[in-house]
Amino acid sequence: MIDLDTLSIVLTGIGIIVAIIYYTLTLRNTSKARQRELILQRFQGYSFEYMEAFVDVENFTDWEDSNDFLEKYGPEKNPEAFSKYLYTMSIYNLAGVFLKEKIADAELIFQLYQPNTIIGMWEKFEPLTLALRERRKYPEYREPFEFLYNEAKKRYPEIQESFKVFQRFV
């Protein structure tokens, strides 16, 4: 038979284990809530301004190379279009920073920003980004966005094929 002292020790141990589990779950939930709060504070991705800029940038299709892009949409020729381009790219760059630095987890990032959009935007502007890296002698230019793109491709390989098919019809 179990004596009162042993029962007291066992119940105390169980209480401590339950408290540790509860505390761990609370910390995890608080951490996720902080991630979401931080992202929503930093990201302007759901504002009207972002949507307007995104749609305009998505329609920048009439350029052949980086020189042609800068001739049509560069800061000297078209400052409004260029600022929309910078704004849109900086949103994805920031998402890449959050993912790369583990400030936010991939699941959360890809819930906020669709992987097919990330893949499409990177692939559309990759030649321009690579040219700007070379011109500016800054190899890390938009590296977080590239990291985000690579993660999206890795996690969602089925999107690559469907996106290529979709591009033929657009």
Image (cartoon, rainbow, N blue to C red):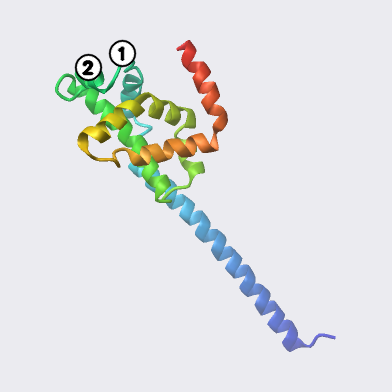
State which tag comes first along the sequence, 1 or 2.
1
Q: Viewer-proximal residue, 74 or 68?
A: 68
Residue 87 spot, x, y in % from top left = 28, 31
Q: Is residue 110 above or below residue 1?
A: above
Q: Position of residue 148 (x, y in %)?
A: 42, 39
- Work out whether residue 39 can be spotted: yes
Question: Residue 107: percent from the left, percent from the top?
Answer: 51, 42
Q: How many marks?
A: 2
Alpha-carbon neighbours of circle 1 within 10 Å: few (<14), some, or many (≥20)? few
Q: Is residue 43 visible?
A: no
- Mark 1 and 2 residues: CB-CB less than 8 Å, in contact? yes
Quarter of the picture containing the C terminus is top left
Q: Position of residue 41 (x, y in %)?
A: 35, 43
- The residue pinned by badge 2 equals 72
Q: Which label is found at residue 54?
A: none
What residue does disc 1 label?
62
Q: Is residue 98 left or right of residue 115?
A: left
Kind of residue indicated by mark 1:
Asp
Q: Residue at x 31, y 31 (%)?
A: 130
Quarter in which the N terminus is drawn: bottom right
The three-letter code of the residue at mark 2 reads Lys
On screen, residue 78 above or below 146: above
- Secondary structure category for the residue under label 2: helix
Q: Residue furthest right?
A: 1
Residue at 48% in and 51% down: 32
Front residue of 140/156: it is 140
Residue pushed farthest left? 76
As helix, strand or loop, the secondary structure at mark 1 comes to loop
Q: Residue furthest top?
A: 169
Image point (27%, 35%), residue name: 133
Residue displayed at 46% across by 40% down: 109
